Each structure stands twice: as C-alpha cells, then as structure tokens.
Image (tube, helix red, strand yellow):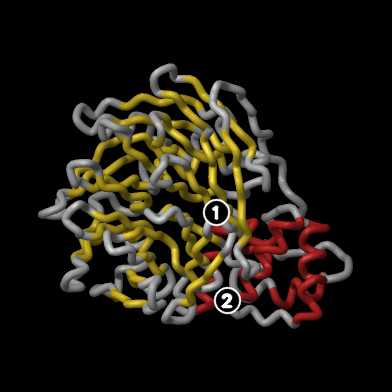
Amino acid sequence: MSTKSLLSALAASLLCATPSAHAQQKPVNLPDGPGKEQVATYCSGCHGLNRVMNSGYPQAYWNTTIRMMLNFGVPIPPDQVHIVTDYLSRNLPEKPKPDANILHGPVKVAIREWQAPVPGSRPHDPLATRDGAIWYTGQMSNRLGRVDPKTGQVREFPLKSPTTAPHGLVEDKDGNIWFTGNHISIVGKLDPKTGNVTEYKMPDPKARDPHSLAFAHDGMLFFTLQQSNMIGRLDPRTGEIRLVTSPTPRSRPYGIMVNSRGVPHVVLFGTNKIARVDPQTMEIKEYPLPDPRARPRRMAYDGNDAIYYSDFPRGMLGRLDPETGQVTEWPSPGGPRSQPYGIVFAKGAVWYSESGTRPNTIVRFDPATEKFQTWAIPSGGYIVRKMDVTPDGNPVIATSTINGVGLVDVK
C-alpha cells in the first residue's frame, strides 16, 4: 500500500464515516474565506473534499489532524499550515455530540495525562509494562513512546521502516515491546535496551492491516488483521507465522485477548459475533450476539474468564459467558451514541471509555451491583481507542486526537 493509499484509509477513519456513492459524486462548494484555495489544493489529493466537508471538529482536533497528514508527507508549505487549519476549524466546527453523563459514586480517581512530543503522533494503543511505564504507538510519527509516570519523562524510539503506522502493543517476558505495523503489514519487536527493531513480514500478500495482538502463556503471539479478515499466530522462536481466515466474510477481527487457560478470543467488529480460536489448530468458533446490530469492538476478561465487550454503535456494555453462550447487556450511561471503545477489567470492576460523548468519559461498572460511575477525561479525551492496566490495577489510556496518554489512578 502506498503512502497515498494509507493516507486515504486513515483519513476515512479520522475525518468521518464513508459517505454514500451519491455524496461522493456531488460537486463540492467550499465556503468562501481565507484558506479556501489552500484547502482545495492540499486536502483533495488523498480522500477528496466530500470527506472533508462531511467532518466537523474543534480547533485542537484540526491541529492534530493536519499535523498527522504532514507527518505522512502531505506537502503543505509551512507558512500555509495555520491558514488551512484556521479555515477548517472556522468553517467545519465540531458537530453536536451527547453531553457526558457524570454519575457520582463511591470510588475516587485522579486522571493524569501527558503529551507526546511530536505533534500529530496519534497515540493509538497504550501499554502498561511491568516496570510501571506507559508505552504508546505513535501511529503517524512512526515511533513507539515510553512515559515514566513518576517523572513525566517521555522517550521515543524510531522504527526501522518508514511509514510503518504502528498500532497495537504488547510486552513479552523479556521486556521487549511487540507491535503491529498497519501500513507495511508486519509484526515488529523493539528491544528497549538497544533500540533495535526486528520485523516479521506477513507470508501472504493478502494479509493486510495487522491490528491488535496478545501473548499466550506458552509464548505464542496471536494477532488480528482487520481489513483482510484474518487471525494470525507468530512463533517468536522461529519467526513462523500462520494465518487463518475468519469464517464470516468482512467480519473485521479487531480486539484480541488470551484468557487464563491460554485460549484467544477475538471481537469481530464487522459483525455481531465474538470468536474463540483454538491455540493449537487455529480453528475458529463464533458466538453470535443476540442483537444483529451489535458490533463488539474491544474486550476484557473478568476473573472467571467471562468476556465484557464494548458495543460501539449501540452504546452498550455486554457480557458473554463463553461456557454457556449467555449474553447480558447494559446501556452505557452516555446513551446510544456514546460509542464505548477501550475496555479493561481491574480491581473487581469493568472500566471503559465512552468515545462519542463530549468530553469523553472513563466509566466504571460494578458487576456485583450493576451500577455505573463516570468521570470526564480532563483533556476531553477525543477517542480513547484502547485501554490497558498497570501491575497495581490502574487503567491507562491513549487520547489519539489530542496526542496524549493518561493514567487513571484509582484511590
């Protein structure tokens, strides 16, 4: 995939939902004003002006979005950047979002946040490592970053290949950081001690968009390939990669985790299903969710290996018991447009983000009482795509569009 193709794909996820074919064919009349000519020139090459005109964000979001495009080679002259950004933020302001529903409760938290040093990095996935650090993927800066929460110091590690577009993160038992490379279809390994990066290329040219990954207890690394509808397994000892295709077409394998018995599960964001993967044979078993509109996006296990999932388009929190197939669901506090996304299980509760509310929230769900408690993310959040948990049980987040990472310190 070329840089231009990647920009088009990323822009589709950054700017708006894909418009209809009719909307794509309609001529675009940009509003008059300073910057119109520049936007027509620089913002039409990769994704077209229809996509731009169907978006709407606050100034901070447009600042980050333009810098993401610059990081990937869009040739906006330096003296034109502020003109383009000002035009977009003035003419395409933030669209209405549901207000965050702040529910008080017994738990106290403090949310701390840090900025990535490169503007437009788009921190995608966070990772809490055993040494207490918080890592992140700089998807649009081609780096992995490490934050020391005690000092606030940030160190970044450049990757081996240009335009890797790192996405998912996981730590192995030796402290190496493994990542998926969306753009160049690899799984990579970073040695933080030396900065050396090892790349494992997909054995099939059809295997695109490596997405999320998780280690099994035996050291095998399982990962999803969203756009190619595949699930993979990598043996770090040999570098061998095995790929299998999800039984449901266009099911978009997304979040993946391995339970306490070494069995991987995958949420299938393109359909209303969650999949179980046999760790030995790679055979896939699917669990249909009751509502055909359900689209699980991320998942977390509780202490009994039951699966909690975030149902992104319906604004629901769900629970699947893989042993019985029983499903229970609860409406998220922010409502049907709250877009639950990143999710973890920590300290006896489910924690997740609502990425569709203004501001984004951190939500706590107590399975014993079935009660919710919520907190606004101080920076606004602006799309927390994934969460992780520190060794002492505190959730961590990455705030993609405002270029940061955060720690939810549970008191």
Residue 17 is situated, as x and y percent measured from the top left of the image, at 57, 53
Is residue 15 in view from this perspective? Answer: no
- Left or right of 394? Residue 140 is right
Residue density around tag 2, few if under 14, some if 14–19, many if 20 or more, within 10 Å: some
Q: Residue at x 30, y 41 (%)?
A: 274
Above or below, 260 against 132 in this view is above
Residue 27 is situated, as x and y percent measured from the top left of the image, at 71, 65
In front of the other: 127 or 109: 109
Is residue 186 in view from this perspective? Answer: yes
* Secondary structure of the residue carrying numbered label 2: loop
Q: Residue furthest front?
A: 151
In front of the other: 342 or 12: 342
Q: Residue at x 37, y 77 (%)?
A: 197
Residue 87 is situated, as x and y percent measured from the top left of the image, at 81, 64
Quadrant of the rendered image containing residue 347: top left
- Left or right of 350? Residue 401 is right
Q: Please give the label number shown on residue 150.
A: 1
**What amino acid is labelled 2 in the image?**
Phe
Q: Residue at x 34, y 59 (%)?
A: 171
Q: Please give the label number shown on residue 72.
A: 2
